[in-house]
Image: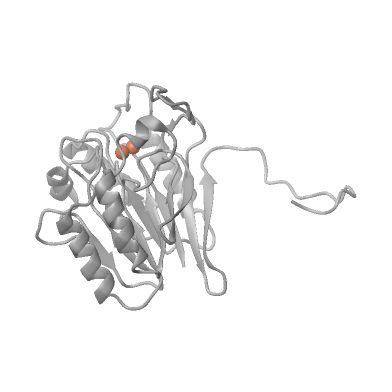
Amino acid sequence: MIIVQLSDLHVRPPGVRAYERVRTNDMLREAIEHVNALRPRPDVVLATGDLVHAGEVEEYAMLRQLLAELEMPVYLVPGNHDDRGNFRKVFGDSDYLPEAGEFLHYAVEDHPVHLIGLDTVVPGEASGELCERRRAWLEDTLTAAPDRPTVIFMHHPPFRTGIEHMDLIALKDADAEALGRLVERHPRIERILCGHVHRPIQVRWRGTLASTAPSTAHQVVLDLRPGAAGTFAMEPPGYQVHTWLRDGGMVSHTASVGRFDGPHSFPDDGTGGVG
Ligand SMILES: [Fe+2]
Ligand SMILES: [Fe+2]
């Protein structure tokens, strides 16, 4: 099974840029073309929040139009730039979404890997929560689920990255701690896949592997100085490819989207082979 993770798409209305600079819609179109060209073809795509930039209905309509080009099913969870109500106005007919209730969380059980999408949004806030109600739902879902490798995907990471201005708006500490205790009780959780930080980052966390993904648009600058101001740069955009190998477990790759020289074959230059 091949799972693609797109993150932080920050889609805008047609012709409008994010932060007056970033052509997020065009960049998502290129990422989707890249995903569709992968062979073997991925089975599913997950999108880990900040689906649109300002939570507007017009942006979700644009997002829906762009995602229609994907040749595989896509599962969406919201981020701090999203608006649940406006999201539902455009994507409410998606059969994986819960019909009722406040939160946009759900499980997908049609694949060898069990997928659980979580909603960490707090309306009007940049940081995220996984309140008691949401954790209770997760606990029930994990307990009821078949005994299968499981991937949790959500926007706000529950771990610190060292990029301070992003750590200040991550999942709130108390909720991250409670989630950690829950995760430790379910060792079949192979990954916790997050977005929000606009960079690929991995950490061993509470008995599993937790990570963030690059954005399909702008990246957050790698600046580990305490107190550094938040900045973004147009580093190569990308996405994650999580492969479930029957004999090797889950293996995660980072793909870069763009025009790069190559591919070239490895000539035999006597230096010890390929790679
Ligand atoms: Fe974002
Ligand atoms: Fe975010």
Image spot of residue 93 (x, y percent) = 16, 58
From the viewer's perspective, is residue 110 above or below residue 12?
A: below
- Residue appearing at x 22%, y 58% in the figure: 105
Residue 214, quarter of the rendered image? top left
- 180 displayed left or right of 201: left
Residue 110, quarter of the rendered image? bottom left
- 136 displayed left or right of 27: left
In front here: 57 or 48? 48
- 107 displayed left or right of 98: right
From the viewer's perspective, is residue 221 above or below residue 139?
A: above
Q: Is residue 93 visible?
A: no
Image spot of residue 10 (x, y percent) = 31, 36
- The residue at the far right in this view is 270
Image spot of residue 207 (x, y percent) = 43, 62
- Residue appearing at x 20%, y 35% in the figure: 125
- Residue appearing at x 32%, y 26% in the figure: 17
